[in-house]
């Protein structure tokens, strides 16, 4: 072992280390609300130029690499939209006959995802869109494939979304035919080789076939009804004969998604309306 | 080379790393195995300074990553502080003036950073194993490769001595 001459550690090196370690541990122990506010403040001030650069990079990449894919998606969407008018008219007529009120329409705001090179990226996503567009914490975040997560913080220029991969994420969900309700949460099991979800709280008497599409139920009011979450990939486990927990393959991958849509919650009606 | 000119080139070097991290990486390498140029900047600070200064630099770099990825605020600061200190301490004890030793230092630092971040942020065990055994080694390799290319091209800018 060769020791470099003239260089070593001393007490003057230990003190900054201890201070930094204490500050780090203090930051971990901060209440979530404070840490999000602090992060938001730093993002909107000191780091704004760097994020501006990263946003331009994300836009430039989109312009080059994803142009053909977006064009192809647009063509498919245009084709599908041709029969939409008839379908909408038919739907409205049936709703009228049944006396149902008009379906709530949600506005969406497109956002670039600014990925970071750290292993926790994917549990939260930094979005290049701010409060000025009308987004608020609690709004759902979706990609063309399905549900990605929800906003937990919205600043003037950027926002942070908690994705389904975050251990705290939960969403009320229902099978495509509306017969089985449950709660979707990320799986915390040891033997997983990749991140997947669990469809929990399914009554023991209910059976969900493999491949069934699971959508948001709209219960709770956080997520709009009908957003695709994942597909059932088998029974995960059974709890004491009263609950089945299904393994769910998520449709959207937060680690790879480059663009998302933030679903703006409709404004609360004025009192008396 | 005057001290003033050397200082200017050093700042230019770190500006280059910031540009690589915030512009080139999102355009070309975006993904979980993409090189982390912020960590490379920290390692370059660490190998040319005392452990105490490297710990402070690590804390600041970690704070930046926490602000940009607030999955678990403080985990990045903790991880980068430890890695910065250990890298500077390792440099003080050994002679890493070799390209391969530097590559090992970059790769080891990145893997350790990721490991501490994953543990400190309470990662579920299902996500921990692929994170530690698949994605972190891949990112460590890509970062080490990028670091060596940077060192070979800009070693004068970063005032780093390399044995050839």
Image: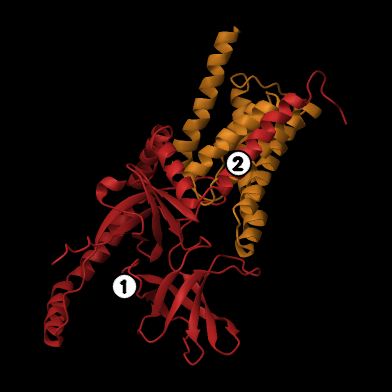
The percent coordinates of residue B144 (x first, y second) are: 64, 39
- Residue drawn at (13%, 78%), measured in percent from left and top? A92
Rate crowding at label 2 as few (under 14), some (14 to 19) or many (20 or more) other CA atoms within 10 Å: many
Q: Chain of mark 1?
A: A
Q: Quick one: B28 or B21, which is closer to the camera?
A: B21
Secondary structure category for the residue under label 2? helix
The percent coordinates of residue A104 (x first, y second) are: 21, 70
Residue at the far bottom in the pictured view: A205
Quick one: quadrant of the N terminus of chain B?
A: top right
Q: Quick one: B101 or A48, which is closer to the camera?
A: A48
Answer with the quarter of the image where residue B164 lies. Answer: top right
The percent coordinates of residue B65 (x first, y second) are: 52, 41
- Residue drawn at (67%, 38%), measured in percent from left and top? B83
Q: Is residue B144 visible?
A: no
Secondary structure category for the residue under label 1? loop
Q: Residue A225 has which mark?
A: 1
Say if A130 sits above or below A199 in the image: above
Chain A colour in the picture: red
Q: Is residue A239 visible?
A: yes
Chain B colour in the picture: orange
Q: Which residue in the structure is indicated by mark 2?
A: A24
């Amino acid at each position: 072992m060769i020791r470099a001459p003239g260089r070593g550690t001393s007490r003057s090196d230990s003190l900054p280390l201890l201070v930094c370690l204490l500050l780090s541990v203090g930051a971990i122990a901060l209440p979530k609300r404070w840490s999000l506010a602090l992060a938001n403040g730093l993002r909107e001030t000191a780091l704004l130029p760097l994020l501006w650069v990263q946003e331009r990079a994300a836009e430039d990449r989109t312009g080059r690499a994803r142009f053909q894919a977006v064009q192809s998606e647009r063509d498919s969407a245009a084709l599908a939209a041709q029969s939409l008018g008839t379908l909408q008219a038919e739907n409205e007529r049936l709703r009228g006959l049944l006396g149902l009120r008009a379906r709530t329409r949600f506005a969406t705001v497109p956002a670039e995802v600014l990925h970071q090179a750290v292993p926790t990226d994917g549990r939260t996503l930094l979005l290049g869109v701010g409060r000025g567009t009308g987004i608020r914490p609690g709004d759902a975040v979706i990609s063309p494939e399905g549900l990605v997560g929800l906003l937990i913080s919205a600043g003037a220029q950027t926002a942070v979304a908690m994705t389904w991969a975050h251990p705290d994420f939960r969403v009320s969900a229902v099978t495509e035919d509306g017969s089985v309700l449950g709660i979707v949460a990320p799986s915390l099991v040891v033997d997983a080789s990749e991140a997947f979800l669990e469809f929990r709280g399914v009554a023991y008497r209910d059976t969900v076939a493999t491949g069934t599409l699971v959508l948001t139920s709209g219960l709770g009011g956080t997520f709009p009804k009908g957003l695709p979450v994942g597909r059932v990939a088998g029974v995960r486990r059974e709890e004491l004969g009263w609950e089945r927990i299904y393994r769910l393959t998520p449709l959207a991958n937060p680690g790879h998604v480059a663009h998302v849509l933030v679903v703006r919650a409709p404004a609360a009606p004025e009192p008396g309306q | 080379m005057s001290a003033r000119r050397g200082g200017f080139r050093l700042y230019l070097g770190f500006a280059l790393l910031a540009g690589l991290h915030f512009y080139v990486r999102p355009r070309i390498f975006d993904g979980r195995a993409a090189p982390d140029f912020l960590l490379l900047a920290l390692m370059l600070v660490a190998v040319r300074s005392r452990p105490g200064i490297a710990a402070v630099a690590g804390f600041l770099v970690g704070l930046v990553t926490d602000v940009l990825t607030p999955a678990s605020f403080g985990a990045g600061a903790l991880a980068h502080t430890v890695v910065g200190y250990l890298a500077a301490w390792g440099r003080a004890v050994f002679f890493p003036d070799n390209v391969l030793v530097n590559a090992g230092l970059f790769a080891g630092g990145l893997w350790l950073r990721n490991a501490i971040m994953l543990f400190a942020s309470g990662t579920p065990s299902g996500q921990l194993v692929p994170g530690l055994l698949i994605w972190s080694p891949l990112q460590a390799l890509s970062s080490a490769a990028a670091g060596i290319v940077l060192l070979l091209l800009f070693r004068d800018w970063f005032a780093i001595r390399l044995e050839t």
